[in-house]
Image: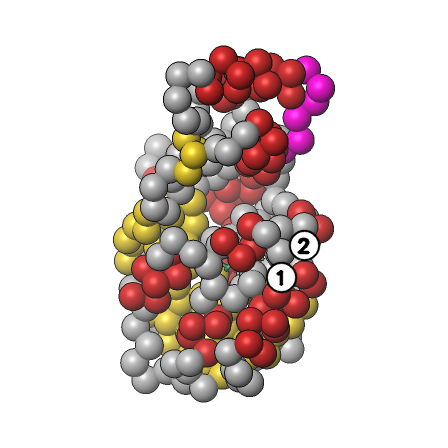
Amino acid sequence: MTIAAIDFARLYRDHMAATARGPKAAGDWNARAGSVGKRLAHGGYAEAFIARMDLSGCESLLDVGCGNGALSLPLAARLRHIVALDYSPAMLEALREGARAQGAGNIDARLCAWEDDWNDVPECDIAIASRSTQVEDMAAALAKLHAKARRRVYLTHRVGGHFVDPQILPVLGRRQLPLPDYIYILNILHGMGIHARVDYIDGGEPAAITGFDELLRRVAWSLGALDADEIARLHRWHDERIGRGPILMPARRWAFIGWEKP
Ligand SMILES: C[S@@+](CC[C@H](N)C(=O)[O-])C[C@H]1O[C@@H](n2cnc3c(N)ncnc32)[C@H](O)[C@@H]1O
């Protein structure tokens, strides 16, 4: 068998379908727009993303899964027109608030999902998707992003599938498949004839958990809802573990993937 025999688009879909949690729903993100959504902009991530972009010769940008505008807001100061899509109304509202606050009148924020009909989404010089590619069908999402970009495409996707301390899964008694990581994307793109550039953005220092409630919230966000037995196990682990020093959540690492249109 050779690599040409592998259908990476199908492999990704099968992997995503086999994970216990799959993609999140808009409502999950609405709930985070006010709190964690604001934090998404911090930690130097947006600066690191923008530093890796080539804006030369470009005036317009499409930002898919724009969230609260960690990228759309700073880029609005450097480009003429931004089209920002997200399926979470609360995230879009946070973005509009940010745009008002900085007097940016050039952001067209639209309620639109990866999976929606994109006929009305305009082509832009650059298309980006930052930390927003947890979809059921990656090949379809990449094809849409590629089709809407005139010159360049940039995206980030998780490196490694779990964003929690590896000790926690055995504590819960779970054998959970990690979410598909960026390596699928490179292979799907290769199959599309696209030889993308890859770099990595590290998500800063590991964060110390401030208490059990925060630990539970973070674990449930990463692994899906916990049942009563799992919550009790996690609580026991927390109480025992905290006696030996701060509990650190591992820093996130993102693969930054970019390519030029021919
Ligand atoms: C981790 S946030 C990233 C936000 C922003 N791009 C950034 O890097 O800070 C993920 C965003 O993608 C959006 N999102 C996730 N799945 C989506 C989908 N299927 N269609 C549209 N937006 C989606 C969420 O609502 C959320 O705002």
Q: For the C terminus, give its image quadrant.
A: bottom left
Q: Residue at x 64, y 77 (%)?
A: 120
Cβ–Cβ below 8 Å for labels 1 and 2?
A: yes
Q: Position of residue 170 (x, y in %)?
A: 50, 15
Indicate yes or no: mark 1 CB to ligand 1 under 8 Å.
yes
Above or below for 173 versus 261: above
Q: Position of residue 74 (x, y in %)?
A: 43, 72
Name the kind of residue labelled 1 in the image. Answer: Met
**Which label is found at residue 91?**
1
Q: Which residue is mark 2?
A: 30
Q: Is residue 227 magenta?
A: yes
Q: Position of residue 166 (x, y in %)?
A: 43, 24
Q: Judge the density around disc 2: few (<14), some (14-19), many (≥20) Cα neighbours within 10 Å.
A: some
Q: Judge the density around disc 1: few (<14), some (14-19), many (≥20) Cα neighbours within 10 Å.
A: many
| Res. 192 in view | no
Q: CA distance from mark 1 to mark 2?
A: 6 Å
Helix, strand or loop at label 1? It is helix
